[in-house]
Image (cartoon, rainbow, N blue to C red):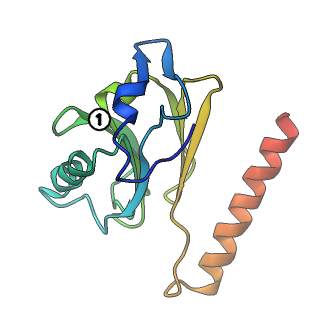
Amino acid sequence: MKVQNKESLSARQKRVIIPGRGIRLNDDHGELKVTTWNVKTLYKDGKLENAVREMRRYRWDILGVSEVRCIECGDVPSYDSTHFYYSGGKKHRFGVGFIVTIEVRECVTGYVPRSDRVMLLQLNTKPIKTNLIQVYAPTSESTEAECENFYKDLEKKERKKKKRK
């Protein structure tokens, strides 16, 4: 799967989406538009709709978002034929997620909310399945302990993943 920039519009003509069977990328031009954005918050009224409008404007298929500030985790149909998957904490702080078009939603096989800073989205793409990971790393304003805990947690999850293989 290739990630394309905003200017390449030929992907819509080359990509074939078969509900329940995945996204087939027909040739080198069959690309999904995947991008990320630190939205600062989706907790306030109208913020999710604004993100979806921008997604439509640039014709993005998948938008990874950070600092969504949602509580807990879940997935909900959202504004204008899109779907929102999110992973948050117990407070309106941090949080990550993915907003996908309804066509891509048909190919989502699962999502794994690992923490309020890490989330995995699984897609049934052809010729191979695709995992997308959205991460919101601590900023320079974070304490040293927060940074250490974040990277220890990532390292621990990576070790678990390698043991399963």
Q: Secondary structure at mark 1?
A: strand
In the orientation shown, which residue stands out farthest toward the left? 46
Direction from residue 118 to residue 46 in the image, left or right: left
Q: Is residue 89 above or below residue 2?
A: below
Direction from residue 11 to residue 48 in the image, left or right: left
Q: Quadrant of residue 132?
A: top right
Residue 98 position, x and y percent, is: 40, 46
Question: How many neighbours does mark 1 have within 10 angstroms: few (below 14), some (14-19), or many (20 or more)?
Answer: few
Q: Is residue 21 above or below residue 44?
A: above
In the picture of the structure, the residue carrying the numbered disc 1 is 76
Residue 97 position, x and y percent, is: 41, 50
Q: Which quadrant holds the N terminus?
A: top right
Direction from residue 135 to residue 104 in the image, left or right: left
Q: Which quadrant holds the C terminus?
A: top right
What's the residue at 41%, 19% (across, down)?
A: 17
Q: Is residue 52 above or below residue 129?
A: below
- Decide if residue 87 is in sight here: no
Q: Quadrant of residue 104?
A: top left
What's the residue at 65%, 26% (across, down)?
A: 128
